[in-house]
Image (cartoon, helix red, strand yellow):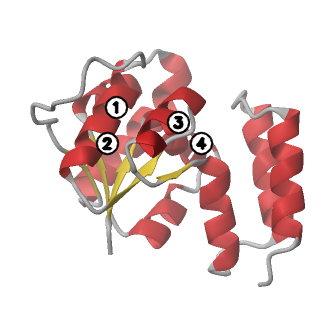
Amino acid sequence: MNTTISNSSPLIAFMKKREVTLLRSLFGSIIIPPAVLQELTEGGNELLLEKQTLENCVKEGWISVKPVPKTTLPPLPLGMGEAEAINLSLTEQPCLLLMDEKKGRNIAQAIHIPVLGTLGILKLALLRRLKTREEIAQNIDILLKGKFYLSSELILRFLEDIRHVET
């Protein structure tokens, strides 16, 4: 299996839904760079659940923190977590990068790093029969109520896309 590296947003999405174990089922283990750990553990009270969940996952050993080696990329116009996740992905080939932010996804794809966002992870769960379409619709509702940003256009395209997936 390829290495899986994650930025903070997909982790937050599945922690908010209390389904972080789905990530473990799909990917086995996940590596995060130090900036992602910092984003998740130094956030205010709004990330308290995520902080505790992440600490448990690290203790269990299926999420690990790996320092980012020196890279040849110029400074990226991204947040520190996104930039470190992309740079770490360059050193862990082959790998899959979990990231939602459009600018970061575009940069990663431009340098041939495969990327999967929260909705792509849900689609993968559907394909592997770990979730039903109804559960995915409920998940999207939970994310939106939890103030996780997904545009209406993106949600509609995604729902249309999974409508045609055979399970």
Secondary structure of the residue carrying tag 4 is helix
Mark 1 crowdedness (10 Å alpha carbons): few <14, some 14-19, many ≥20: many
Q: Quadrant of the C terminus?
A: bottom right
Query: Is there CB contact under 8 Å for labels 4 and 1?
Result: no
Q: Rounded to the nearest whole Å, what is the CA distance between mark 1 and mark 3?
A: 19 Å
Q: Rounded to the nearest whole Å, what is the CA distance between mark 1 and mark 2?
A: 13 Å
Between residues 142 and 52, which one lies in front from this camera angle? 142
Q: Residue at x 16, y 30 (%)?
A: 72
Number of numbered discs overlaid on the protein picture: 4
Between residues 143 and 114, which one lies in front from this camera angle? 114
| Residue designated by label 1 | 36
Query: Is there CB contact under 8 Å for labels 1 and 2?
Result: no
Residue 146 seen in render: yes
The amino acid beneath tag 4 is Ala
| Residue designated by label 4 | 13
State which tag comes first along the sequence, 4 or 1. 4
Residue 55 - label: 2
Q: Rounded to the nearest whole Å, what is the CA distance between mark 3 and mark 2?
A: 30 Å
| Residue designated by label 3 | 106
The amino acid beneath tag 2 is Glu
Secondary structure of the residue carrying tag 2 is helix
Between residues 72 and 127, which one lies in front from this camera angle? 72
Q: Mark 1 against mark 2, which lies toward the viewer? A: 1
Secondary structure of the residue carrying tag 1 is helix
Residue 4 located left or right of residue 9:
left
Q: Residue at x 38, y 24 (%)?
A: 39
The amino acid beneath tag 1 is Val
The amino acid beneath tag 3 is Asn
Q: Mark 3 against mark 4, which lies toward the viewer? A: 3
Q: Rounded to the nearest whole Å, what is the CA distance between mark 4 and mark 1?
A: 14 Å
Residue 42 seen in render: no
